[in-house]
Each structure stands twice: as structure tokens, then as C-alpha cells.
Amino acid sequence: MSIFLAQLLTGLAYGMLYFMIAVGLTIILGVMNVVNLAHGTLFMLGAYIAFTFINDEVNFWAALLLAVLLTAVLGLVLEKLLIKRIYGKELEQVLLTFGLSFIIADAIEWIWGTEMHTLPVPGLLSGSLSIGSTAFPLYRLFVVFIGCLLALLLWYLETKTRVGAIIRAGVDDRAMVSALGINVGLVFTGVFAFGAALAGLSGVLGGPLIGMYTGMDSEILVTSLIVVVIGGLGSWKGSFIGAIAIGVIETLGKVWFPSLSMLTVFLIMMIVLIIRPQGLFGREVA
Amino acid sequence: MLELQDVHSYYGTSYILQGVTFSVLKGKCVALLGRNGAGKTTTIHTIAGLHKAKRGSIRFKNRPLESLPPHQISRLGIGLVPQGRRIFPSLTVKENLTMPARKRKADDGGINWDLEKIYELFPVLKERENNFGTQLSGGQQQMLAIGRALMTNPEFLLMDEPSEGLAPVIIDQIGEIIVQLKEAGLSILIVEQNIALACKAADEILIMNKGKIVWSGSPDGLMANEGIQHKYLGVSS
């Protein structure tokens, strides 16, 4: 039992990381109709940026903040310089974002090399919490807490703020929003930078758990695309539920059916798509 | 206040506006009539910046609009009540109104529209403020579309077929609202199929056919001219 609970926590922590990255992907998709295939690379970049700062004796939290800021700035620059030019052109978007992911991944390899790294667990959270006979690592609890906090923040932004209303209206009818005097281009830039920041955040928070290695960007991208598909395109609630499901099932699957562990996640996606082709929280598409 | 000079516009290869010239004076309501496909909605979209003109000039308060994006045109003081209302279904009635809200810029003693004033004008919207936009009836959606445009505090209102799909009694109500807005100082360009509504609200009537203005005159002039009505508006006598 206690092993199961510990594994469940691990699954939840992974799920929250998937949520943090997938939610950026799904919001960018829902609002701007762009599949950002470089999103996994921004995740990896966030982790490496924090790695550099931590090696320079910067404290974990400051490194986290700097990495999030820098990935947000990179997202902003990418949107302003490149992505802005190809809204509505799907093929170009795929080529551009896929190309960007190669360029950034190669730059990472060039700067940081190909060996595997991990980020240290911050001192404050290095212990564990014992309940009965089960020890729950504090850092994993912390990641779950941050994921829930983010979900709460997104709920608040979406339903209680004017920016949230503008974004929802933009998904409904973009041209009408601009005809009411709102600069939709600016909203897009903000959304893209926000998504990039979340990718950076999850990369840093994932550093002590997943680490950083060549090729992790495409692995994490595929997983988060699966989360987006299961949850429903454009729905952060769907991403939350989908990411938790994937994190838990993947982790438990590795323990219970090691030989099938690669398959479990895809099986879930298949089942969801058969029952609800639009995803758990997706809108019906006519 | 608004001047179009020889405006030409295309959708793909179809030549829609073939040299449109007219103007709307401050505080006046001009109605644009014509059959389906005459180019009325394209005219509205071209003014609002949702569609780009190929040639010609559009000036609002003597500033050229033709190269501006829609949000800047809106911010100059042009409000859009679009065809089909285009209420945001993911927003409540209240959010549909507050989302685009802007304070009045012009210092001309006009009304500064806010949520309270909109609810005064359309009490039914207050009753339904927590409903989602698409849970309203057609008439209520039209009121919401008008209210939403007013919340941007425009000096000029573009209205595209406000009577479309509404019951006659609601059309009368909308007509009264338009007259009221004009009296409050707004300049209005209204596209209509409903001749009675257009003649009730407008100071001047323009008739459009195949992308050109083919007739202009007063509402009385149009009512008296059955030949024009028959030729361009498909009214059988």
C-alpha cells in the first residue's frame, strides 16, 4: 500500500509537469490556432538555463525565476519576429516551429553538451514527509502543489478577469474582437510568451525529477500533445485532467506492466478518442 | 464625418465594390439599401477594416482609415453592430458588454456609455446578465450587439441589418432605439433590407446595386418612387 501511495505521488508530480507544459501548448492552440512544435524545446531550454545559473551559485528559486523570465522573453521574440507572420498558414507553422525546435535543441547541445544533467532538489524541499509507513518526498508534493496553484490561477484568469474574457471571445470570433477595438495581435504575443514561460517553469521544476538529456524535448512534446488530444484542444481543464491521468497511468504502468509501459499512454489516448473524439473537455467540431 | 471616395474592393477575384462614393454627416443617419449581394456588408466591413479596399479613400473625421487595422479604426470612434449579431457565446451577457468597454474620449457632451446606462436602455439585458450570449432571443441578441458597440463609446455606429430575423414588434423597438441614439448625437450608417425601418430612422437613403450607389434621396423621395423600389429593392407593387 505504502509503495502504491508513493508511486501515486510520483505519478501526480509527473502529471503536474505534463500539465504545466501541455497547458501552454493547448492555450496557444486554442487562441491562436498554432501548434507550437518548439514547445518541448522551450521546456528543455528552461531547465538548462536554470542549470547554468545554479552552477554559478545562484539559488534554486532565483534560477527558476530567471529561467521562466528568459523563456518568456524568447517566446515573445519568436512570436513578434516569426510566428506573427504565418497566422492561418498551418503548413508554414509546422515547418517553422519544427525547424525552431531543431535550432534550439542544437544550440543547447552546442552550449551544454550531450551528457545528462539533473538539477539539485532545493535544500528546503530535500526531505520527505512521513505519513504512517509511507515517506512522501517533499519536492514531489511541492510540484503537485504548484500544479494545483497554476490550475487555480488559470481558472481565475479565465473566468474572473477582462483578459480572460478577451481570450475567450478571441477563440469565439477573433475578427469581432478586433472590430471592438482590441489589439488581438498584442493578446497573441502575450499568450505565446505566457505559454513559453510555463514551458520554462515546468522544465525547471522537472529538472530534479526528469533531468535534462538530448532528445528529451521531443519525448516531452509527444507526451504533451497526447495530453492536449485527450483533454480536448484549447481546454486547460482538459489538460489538467488529461495530464494527471497520463502521469499516473504512465508511472503505475511502468511498475505494473513494465513491458507495456511504452504502450499504456497510447492505449489511453486511443480509448479516449474512440469514446470522445473531441477530447474530454473539447468543443464539438462541426 | 465619414467620407468614402471611389472605393473598390474584391473578394478573391470577384469585384464587389466598384467605386463607392458617399458621405455621412455628423449627427445624421444614412441607410444603405439594396438586394442581397449588392455589396452592402462589404461596404460596412471595408469601413471597419475587416476587409481591405483595393483602391479609393475612406476618411473619418478627416483621418484616412484605409490602411488601419480594425482595432485602431474602432478606437477612432467607430462602433460595429455586425450582421448576424456575432455575440460571443463563451461570454455572459455582462461580459459581452464589459469586455470591450472604453471610456468616452470625445469631449462633446455626449453620453458616456457604461454598464448602468446600457441596462437603462435595455432593461432585459440586466435581467439576463448572467446568461450566456447565445441563450438570448434574436431581439435580445440584437440589443446586446448594440449595447456592446455602445460600450466602446463610439461617435459613429455601423449597423448591419439590425432587423434581420426579428419579429415586427421587435423591429419597431429597434427602430425607436436607433432614432434615440441619433438624437443622442451619434452618426449612423445602417444597412437594411427592411425599407420601413430604414425610412423611419434615416435622414438619407442610398441604394446600392452591383457595387455602386445608384440612387440617393430622402426617405419620402424613396417612398414616393415606386419605380426605384421595384427596380433595385425587389418590392412588388
Image (tube, coloured by chain):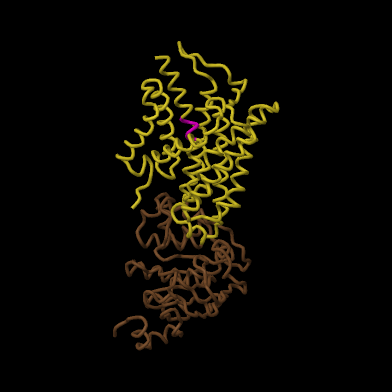
Chain colours: A yellow, B brown
For the point 40% across and 74% down, which residue is it?
Answer: B192
Q: Position of residue A132 (x, y in %)?
A: 45, 11
Please give left or right for residue A66 compared with residue B178 in the image: right
Q: Position of residue B78 (x, y in %)?
A: 54, 67
Q: Residue furthest top?
A: A133
Name the main secondary structure of what is drawn in magenta: helix
Quarter location, residue A55: top right
Viewport quadrant of the C terminus of chain B: bottom left
Instruction: Using the image as rendered, state which of residue A97 and residue B124 is in the foreground.
Output: A97
For the point 47% across and 72% down, which residue is it?
Answer: B10
Please give left or right for residue A279 compared with residue A151 in the image: left
For the point 55% across and 60% down, which residue is it?
Answer: A181
Q: Position of residue A89 (x, y in %)?
A: 48, 55
Instruction: Using the image as rendered, state which of residue B183 and residue B21 is in the foreground.
Output: B21
For the point 43% across and 31% down, which residue is it?
Answer: A244
Q: Residue furthest right?
A: A56
Q: Is residue A17 magenta?
A: yes
Viewport quadrant of the N terminus of chain B: bottom right
- Total marks shown come to 0
Is residue B15 depicted above or below A80 in this figure?
A: below
Q: Is residue B118 magenta?
A: no
Q: Where does the magenta region start and end?
A: A15-19
Q: Position of residue A107 (x, y in %)?
A: 61, 39
